[in-house]
Image (spheres, rainbow, N blue to C red):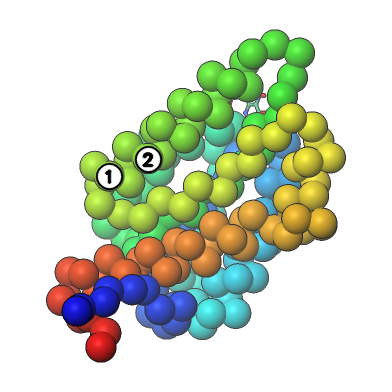
Amino acid sequence: MKIYQGNMIGTGLRFAIVASRFNEFITSKLIDGAKDALLRHDVRHQDIDLFWVPGAWEQPLTAKEIALSGKYDAIISVGAVIKGDTSHDVYVASEAAKGLAMVSLEQRVPVAFGILTCDTLDQAIERAGVKAGNKGADAALAALEAANLLANIRNGAEEE
Ligand code: INI
């Protein structure tokens, strides 16, 4: 049996973080978590670029342009969609999720989904470095593993 998996070594890999300004109080913590996770896995500071977008709705198109540039091994999307008085947030979150999945599949580049979809601000805070960890860091680690997995599949480098 051949087993393919991605290791967690970031040496030489390049990452794009796409971050929403909307709910920046939360998003900035997710960016910090993502950067910290990458740096602690030997990604170089100069190999991480940050792209600000207005909100989660704007993430898919931006991620697509980034993917088309061919400069990055993976994209990490971070943001926070928090329930409001209307159903606006539902449309924003679902289109962001669908759009980012589409970019990943069409462009064949890992796009980690680090956009929080929360009912309350407290839930978002808990996921931005408090009780429930930091989902930006989790997304960065998923992007790293997925980037190395794809490289192994493309190189035919299985593990025993
Ligand atoms: N954008 C977010 O990133 N999070 C939200 O919670 C949010 N809500 O709830 O409205 C949000 N809306 C803005 C949206 O992403 C677009 O920027 C806007 O609609 C302009 O296209």
Q: Looking at the picture, how far across and down is residue 90, in whole percent?
A: 59, 21
Where disc 1 sits, the SS reads: helix
Query: Image quarter for residue 154?
Result: bottom left
Q: Which residue is mark 1?
A: 105
Distance CA(mark 2)–CA(mark 1): 6 Å
Q: Is label 2 in contact with label 1 (beta carbons under 8 Å)?
A: yes
Residue shown at the point (40%, 79%) measured from the top left: 7
Q: Which residue is mark 2?
A: 101
Residue shown at the point (44%, 81%) measured from the top left: 9
The 10 Å Cα crowd at callout 2, few under 14, some 14 to 19, many 20 or more, is some
- Disc number for residue 50: none
Query: Image quarter for residue 74?
Result: bottom left
Residue shown at the point (26%, 76%) measured from the top left: 3
Q: Is residue 91 visible?
A: yes
Q: In the picture provided, is 49 more to the left or to the right than 122? A: left
Q: Quadrant of the N terminus?
A: bottom left
Residue shown at the point (60%, 79%) measured from the top left: 40
Q: In the picture provided, is 138 more to the left or to the right than 66? A: right
Amino acid of disc 1? Leu
Q: Looking at the picture, how far across and down is residue 134, in whole percent?
A: 69, 58
Where disc 2 sits, the SS reads: helix
Q: Looking at the picture, how far across and down is residue 141, in whole percent?
A: 52, 66
Above or below: residue 38 compared with residue 82? below
